Image (spheres, grey):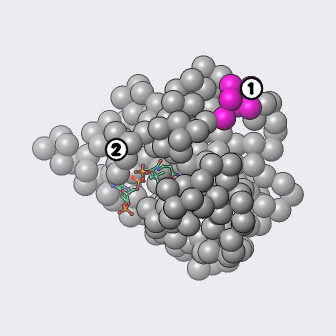
Amino acid sequence: MTSSPGSGDLRTVRPLAEADIDVLQAIDTRTHGQAWSQRTFLDELDQANRVHIVAEATGEIVGHAAAWTNAVSGRITNVAVAPEHAGRGHATALLLELIDQLVNERQVANLQLEVRPANRRAQRMYRRFGFVPVGIERSFYDRSDERGSTDALVMAVADVCAEPWRQRLGDVHTSHRQVEKERNAGASA
Ligand SMILES: CC(C)(COP(=O)(O)OP(=O)(O)OC[C@H]1O[C@@H](n2cnc3c(N)ncnc32)[C@H](O)[C@@H]1OP(=O)(O)O)[C@@H](O)C(=O)NCCC(=O)NCCS
């Protein structure tokens, strides 16, 4: 579990608990237009190869992230932050923690995720973390986006041991901490 000062609040990133599921369903419905069922969340919690974390600020759940792993890959399946809490570094904090768990605790060799081709904001975030586009997965999503597309852009980090990527992740960490420090100083000034 990690805590960091953000937006004048102490943010906590911690594992998902069963009692969080209703709130996460509401966040996903607002951000993705759909959410996993309670049953699916509970099944996820039962599986050892899943990682689910939530971010809390001022005692309120503001977002969450999830991934699954196999012997070599960590696949990020969701990152979502409630719209009223966007732009405060919560997704960055969630991704930093998720990647730390995948790479350092579960020791995966590479990372992958799918994102809608039209979702430029999320792609920008993933690029900051060193993910690069590696292909298109046709008909990946159940629901069409505003362009009528169900395709996904696949993004990946090919080798988490590569020094340039380690360096980039370190840079994301450093600049995230710096932004939070400045924001926090501004909030308390
Ligand atoms: C995409 C999404 C996850 C981003 O969440 P977020 O919490 O707003 O993201 P962050 O605050 O970490 O980063 C967003 C911006 O804030 C800036 N930022 C990062 N850390 C910051 C901090 N500590 N303080 C202030 N701003 C910060 C970033 O530079 C970034 O700027 P940009 O959007 O211009 O690139 C969120 O908008 C969302 O849930 N979207 C819908 C679901 C989705 O698309 N999920 C991803 C695909 S599965």
| Above or below 151: residue 16 | above
Q: Give the image location of residue 184, x and y in percent.
A: 26, 46
Q: Quadrant of ligand 1?
A: bottom left
Q: Give the image location of residue 39, x and y in percent.
A: 74, 26
Tell me the distance, in whole angstroms, between the alpha carbons under discs 2 and 1.
33 Å
The amino acid beneath tag 2 is Gly
Q: Nearer the viewer, mark 2 or mark 1?
A: 1
The amino acid beneath tag 1 is Arg
Horizontal relation, residue 123 to residue 66: left or right:
left
Return the residue nearer the eye: 25 or 33.
Answer: 33
Residue 26 in magenta?
no
Q: Which residues are magenta?
A: 36-41
> Please, which residue is most extreme toward the bottom here?
164
Q: Quadrant of the C terminus?
A: top left
Q: Give the image location of residue 156, x and y in percent.
A: 67, 69
Q: Which residue shows up at 59% across the image and 70% down it?
A: 131
Question: Which quadrant of the figure has residue 22?
Answer: top right
In the picture of the structure, the residue carrying the numbered disc 1 is 39
| Above or below 18: residue 107 | below
Q: What type of secondary structure mainly makes up the magenta span?
A: helix
Q: Quadrant of the N terminus?
A: top right
In the picture of the structure, the residue carrying the numbered disc 2 is 6
Q: Is mark 2 within 8 Å of ligand 1?
A: yes
Callout 2: SS: strand
